[in-house]
Image (cartoon, grey):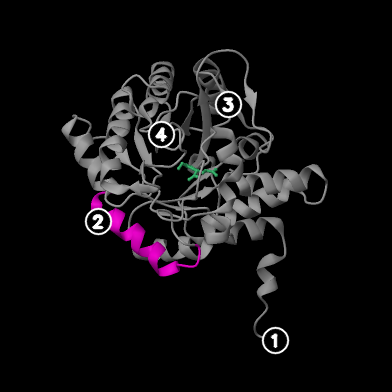
Amino acid sequence: MIHRPRRLRRSALLREAVAQTRLHRSRLIMPHFVREGGGADTPVEAMPGVARHSVARLVEQVGADRELGLASVLLFGVTERKDTRGSAATAADGLVARAVAGLRERFGDELVIMTDVCLCGATDHGHCGVLRDGRVLNDETLPLLSAMAVAHARAGADVVAPSDMMDGRVAAIRAALDGAGCSDTAILSYSSKFASAFYGPFRAAADSAPKQGDRKSYQLDPRNRREALRESLLDEQEGADMLMVKPALSYLDVIADVRAHTLLPLAAYNVSGEYSMVKAAAAQGWVDEARLVPEILTSMARAGADLIISYHARDVAREGWVA
Ligand code: PBG
């Protein structure tokens, strides 16, 4: 026999030497929910290990995570102050802006701060843009997203991450940031974001589910692989600094497609429902979480993701499931 691929699998050290894909904690981004007020954390029922934090508790938690080598965060605001245009989210001194300022003050440049830019957590109808006669209006939404991005950037965010899926929002946000003197703030676009059932636990955590209808008129149809690539390439043309595929695990083909067509860094979002499924099965003893989680995250890296946004990040770093 000439071909014996098993030769290179003989020992752990040899397997380590020829391993093609490696996870590293510097590539992991930990998502956080920040809420108004003080007091103890409020757990998210469907996401064991995840909670909504006050700004003060967020700063503490991020400090603990940094000790584990987690240097990047992605922030989501959870607010009860909702109106038709999501003004709580776009205000210059809004919740996320205050959280960013608090983190920046405490950690300086020793933390990469990213913020989600979207209206759904602050609109009373739960949609990601301005709603009129049952329709989400594209161009009317752009100035609101831009204001939100500028508020986060002025507070000290390194990266703003629009997740709304309005057309032209990357160009609009880039122009607004530059106009506000924030030309160094980067944009991580949720460029290929699908209308997915995997966001269920997040929407419960952020109280951001649409009260009526769904997000199919703006988020991508899961059947459309070509269109997903097109969306990412359009966002690159509009000036995105990094691209994203979301969800990740059911969309590894899309990650591979985008990776093959862009020179930009690419992020994969291992979303709430993906996390909840693993946690639920692990709690029953049906799967081995310590092996499953690294395998899942490795598949995203192998498909071509540079960065991975994952609620598992803390467990992974604490348990030493990555370098
Ligand atoms: C806001 C937003 C959502 C997620 C991230 N940003 C929810 C949605 O689009 O409905 C989902 C993240 C997750 O499920 O972990 N638009």
For the point 67% across and 55% down, the residue is 13
Q: Amino acid type of disc 1?
A: Met
Q: Dot 2, crowdedness within 10 Å: few (<14), some or many (≥20)?
A: few
> Which is in the foreground here, disc 2 or disc 3?
3
Considering only order in the chain, which callout, 2 or 1, is on the residue closer to the N terminus?
1
What is the spatial separation of the Cα atoms under label 1 and label 4, in whole angstroms? 55 Å
x, y (%) of residue 151?
A: 30, 27
**For this view, does 112 lie left or right of residue 47?**
left
State whether residue 260 is above or below residue 156.
below
Q: Earlier in the sequence, mark 2 or mark 3?
A: 3
The residue at which mark 3 appears reads as: 52
Q: Which residues are magenta?
A: 222-240
Viewer-side residue, 26 vs 225: 225
Q: CA distance from mark 3 to mark 1?
A: 59 Å
Q: Which mark is residue 115?
A: 4
- Name the N-terminal-most of marks 4 and 3: 3
- Measure the C-alpha gap from mark 2 to mark 4: 22 Å
Q: Which residue is mark 2?
A: 237
Q: Say which residue label 1 marks.
A: 1
